Image (cartoon, helix red, strand yellow):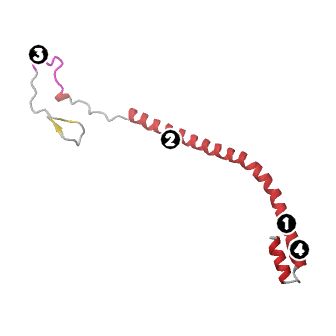
Amino acid sequence: MIIKLIAVVVVAPALPVPGFLVFVIGRWFGNMYATAQLFVKREMPARALGFSSMILWWARIYHDFEVKGNSLERLEGYVVIEQEPKPVQEKKPAAAWPTSGDLRVEGLSACYSPDGAKVQ
């Protein structure tokens, strides 16, 4: 920067005073900026640590919320169970049924779900 200033002074002799004034003002602002940055540079690591721990805290809170929500869904699955229809009185077998050791079933079919394929 000094070399550029000297080159300008040699080429244009009317500019040394304004050039020197710009140099002094720039140097003063530079020192003021550097002094202000010292405080910021000292505080940045501490603030970064606080900021990252705050992010981790929010992530932990969100994770706990998700886990508790999943637990509630699971509990609802255990509480709300699809019930079989109550037996019809006419189709109920006798209380002493079966009366012998042999059991014969005709035309029985079953399926794993209401809309699933029949198992024979």
Residue at numbered disc 3: 101
Given the image, on which type of amino acid does mark 1 rest?
Arg
| Residue plotted at (72% across, 45% down) | 46
Residue 33 sits in quarter = bottom right
Is label 2 or label 1 in front?
1
Is label 2 or label 4 in front?
4
Given the image, on which type of amino acid does mark 3 rest?
Gly
Residue at numbered disc 4: 21
Q: Earlier in the sequence, mark 3 or mark 2?
A: 2
Given the image, on which type of amino acid does mark 4 rest?
Leu
| Residue plotted at (64% across, 45% down) | 52
| Residue plotted at (15% across, 34% down) | 109
Q: Earlier in the sequence, mark 3 or mark 4?
A: 4
Q: CA distance from mark 2 to mark 4?
A: 64 Å
- Residue 23, percent from left and from top: 85, 71
| Vertical order, 86 against 31 (above or below) | above
Residue at numbered disc 2: 66
Given the image, on which type of amino acid does mark 2 rest?
Glu
Residue at numbered disc 1: 27
